[in-house]
Amino acid sequence: MNIQPSQSSLNTKAVSIQAKQQAPSPEETQDTVFNELPEDEFSWGDLGKGIVGSVVGGAVVGVGGAVTGLLKTPRITYEAVKGVWKSEMLGPVLKATVTPVVLAAGLAAPVLTAIGATGYGLFQGFGEAARKNPLAAATKGMETVKDMNGKVSEAIVEGIREAATEKPESADDVYEIKIVEGVKGLATSATSAVVGSVGIGATTALHVPGGYLRATSEIWQSEAPAPLKVGGQLLATAGAVLAVPLGIAGGAVYGLGMGAYKGYTEGFVAGNRETLEGIGDFHKMAKEAIYED
């Protein structure tokens, strides 16, 4: 029996897997860094240590994250594809449609990992070195890479395997689509990946100057001591540099998923329109966060 997968069911599975692999965001990392620093005692010497530590942390976690992405992504992608074909919840046409999307996302994952890991390492390294010394930034960075290589990767694999073992209670619970819908989904996914990459990348680039100025204003209007303000400015600059490439890679992955789902449920034109609307929502959210909050 051909039925459409329920969005709520798919979202529940996605949230379940995401919860197992969730790591602190760059914003959360920045808050942690500055909350742990003794602001009243923060000196120019601490700033010097923090800058060195930021470079060290960014290099260690960035390179380590890139290597981890290159080494672990093939296995995770393999497990994902195997899980798709092993799952009794998906029909053969839907499995054939999802597989190329998973493979394409696997190609983008190492890039996202490398960029995200570099940003994480910059913030983490600054805090560790400022509170202790640059060597501590390197040590902490290696611990982070070890976790990425071990705990995080294994949690992702475990989540995929768990999802693949779910069994339908009846034939009506099996998610399946028609062949023509699968073709529309794949075609839309391919074009939406380009649209998402260009659109979100361009939107990010458009808002980086305003976001950077807003961050700069907040930093220098704060009551933090001058050395800590300088450190915050440097970290904000690094974040601005990484934002656009992260937006380009992230936009491609967003377009892949959105295009595949909306393409087979609503058609090629409507699917790409949904991706464009998502880019519009991202633009609106960024605009409100920067200029209206």
Image (spheres, rainbow, N blue to C red):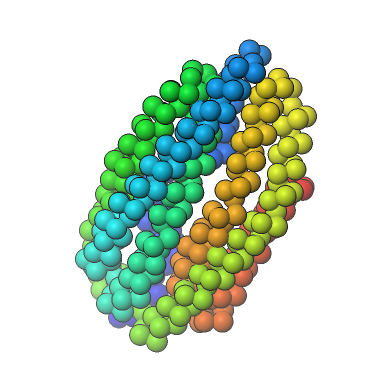
Residue that extends furthest to the top in the rendered view of this protein: 41
User: Which quarter of the figure is the N terminus placed in?
Assistant: bottom left
Q: Nearer the viewer, residue 62 or 38?
A: 62
Q: Residue at x 60, y 75 (%)?
A: 273
Q: Nearer the viewer, residue 39 or 267?
A: 39
Residue 89 x, y percent position in the rendering: 28, 67
Q: Residue at x 52, y 34 (%)?
A: 55
Is 153 placed above or below 95 here?
Answer: above
Residue 217 x, y percent position in the rendering: 77, 36
Is 292 placed above or below 194 here?
Answer: above
Q: Residue at x 42, y 37 (%)?
A: 60
Name the quadrant containing residue 164.
bottom left
For residue 16, say whether it is visible: no
Name the quadrant containing residue 148.
top left
Q: Is residue 87 left or right of residue 126?
A: left
Q: Residue at x 32, y 36 (%)?
A: 146
